[in-house]
Image: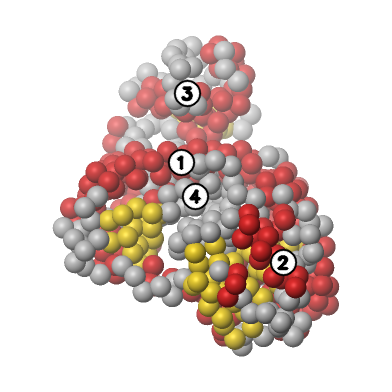
Amino acid sequence: MKPIILELNNRDHKFIYEQLYEALREQILDGSIVPDEKLPSLRGLAKDLGVSVTAVDQAYDQLVVEGYIVARPKSGFFAKHVSRGTSGSPGEDHRKQEIAADIYGEDAFIHDPSCFDFVKWKKCINEVLNYHPDRLLYESDPQGEHELREQVAEYIMRSRGVEASTDRIVIGAGTQQMTSHIARILKKMGINLVSIEEPGYLPVRSMLRDAGFQINRIPVKDDGIDVRMLPGNIQSAVYVSPSNQFPTGAVMTAGRRYELLRWAVENRSIIIEDDYDSELRYFGRPVPALKSLDQEDSVAYLGSFSSTLFPAVKISYMVLPKRMAEIYRETKGEYSQTCSKSEQLTLALFMKKGYYYTGIRRLRTLNARKLEKTVSAMERYLGDKVNVQNTRSGLSVTLRIKPTLDQSSAELAEKAAGIGLDMDPISEVTDQDTSALTYYYSQLPYDMIEQKTEELAGVWK
């Protein structure tokens, strides 16, 4: 095994592990590191370069994920045969897109595999399968696996300031299932009126309407929902997204939050807080959860892992006020757990080992760079056709269509899909009839953003 010579720059804006990853990738591509050549051990390379073992581990993990090296048990890491034609460049992304289209159909979108560390996820899956296979031979607790509820309790306390005991936490398959649980509990409490944000997330409104609730629409201002328009002198509920309202991106101010909490107490009512994307805030600190201010136990708190892990993992959770938790426990035996038990146990281990927290920090950094690049490219190539809004958090931005584009948002989304870009007309997912698109910029690899934006400007002409 010949020594590997690398030059790292502490003044570079990139993290050390990113520099190390790029340098090793380049040496594999140009043949300096030949196929099947063994790479130095984690500790060995860290010592040679004067960097941390963690940095080398992160770089190696990324190279494994992208197929540049392979980890062989008890042997180490070895270079794979990769030519320039499969270098992870935009050309390779196109090739992957063609393969995806063959498997999943022509409407497959471009995705960025670097958004999630599947290597560590596989380690946790293997540990569950190797050491706890007996746990998979019987059904999951309808309330969710206790280990995962423990990790959720620790996580939301640390990151969102929400204090919760495991008997108040419920695990389920997606926010919509959590909403179904809450709807049943509200009915048992005698609540038949639910206020929702206007504009708001259409699937939630549809679920509540189909469950038999009377729906009351409340306008959203720049500082959140207009509390003065909520019903008084009647027990009801209100569904809000105070930290990142969809689709406006409004953040509820502290004053408005306390006003909403007072309304709930005075009217014996329930606030349903959907805290989606709360951790993915790229400028300043994440906004504290409304639930963290709740002194009277009036807030039912909803959260999801789909944004911070990967969308195929439909694991969500909720923290219930005491009176709602008691009703849930009385009836939970009537329902089966629809969230995969193996994935629950894997996630619990993933969080316990600290991988989840590392992943969120890395995702914030990566998406902040992507967001800045996306906004810059949109202004350069499409500044006369769209306004880019909601650019501080989440996995998407809103593109407001200017009159210079005389096509419908549905037509524009279809053309974007033709080049692999995932966009949804806002009118399809909200009750807002407007010429705007939700653009999931985070799915694109960073190096493709400029190219695909220029290509989008071409197909939208």
- Which one is closest to the eye, mark 1 or mark 2? 2
Left or right for 319, reference 52: right
The part of the image, by quadrant, that contains residue 149 is bottom right
- Which one is closest to the eye, mark 3 or mark 1? 1
The part of the image, by quadrant, that contains residue 344 is bottom right
Q: Earlier in the sequence, mark 4 or mark 1?
A: 1
Q: The disc labelled 1 sits on which kind of residue?
A: Ala
Q: Judge by depth and name the residue closer to the eye, 250 or 341.
A: 250
Q: Which residue is mark 1?
A: 368
Q: The disc labelled 3 sits on which kind of residue?
A: Leu
Q: Which residue is mark 2?
A: 262
Label 4 secondary element: loop
Q: Earlier in the sequence, mark 4 or mark 2?
A: 2
How packed mark 2 is, by other alpha carbons closer than 10 Å (few <14, some 14-19, many 20 or more), is some
How packed mark 4 is, by other alpha carbons closer than 10 Å (few <14, some 14-19, many 20 or more), is many
Q: Judge by depth and name the residue closer to the eye, 121 or 230.
A: 230
Label 3 secondary element: helix
Residue drawn where x is 24% and y is 43% of the image: 380
Is residue 351 in view from this perspective? yes
Q: Earlier in the sequence, mark 1 or mark 2?
A: 2
Q: Judge by depth and name the residue closer to the eye, 448 or 371.
A: 371
Q: Earlier in the sequence, mark 2 or mark 3?
A: 3
Q: Which residue is mark 3?
A: 20
Is residue 76 in view from this perspective? no
Label 2 secondary element: helix
Compared to residue 65, the image places residue 59 above or below, namely above
Q: Which residue is mark 4?
A: 393
Q: The disc labelled 2 sits on which kind of residue?
A: Arg
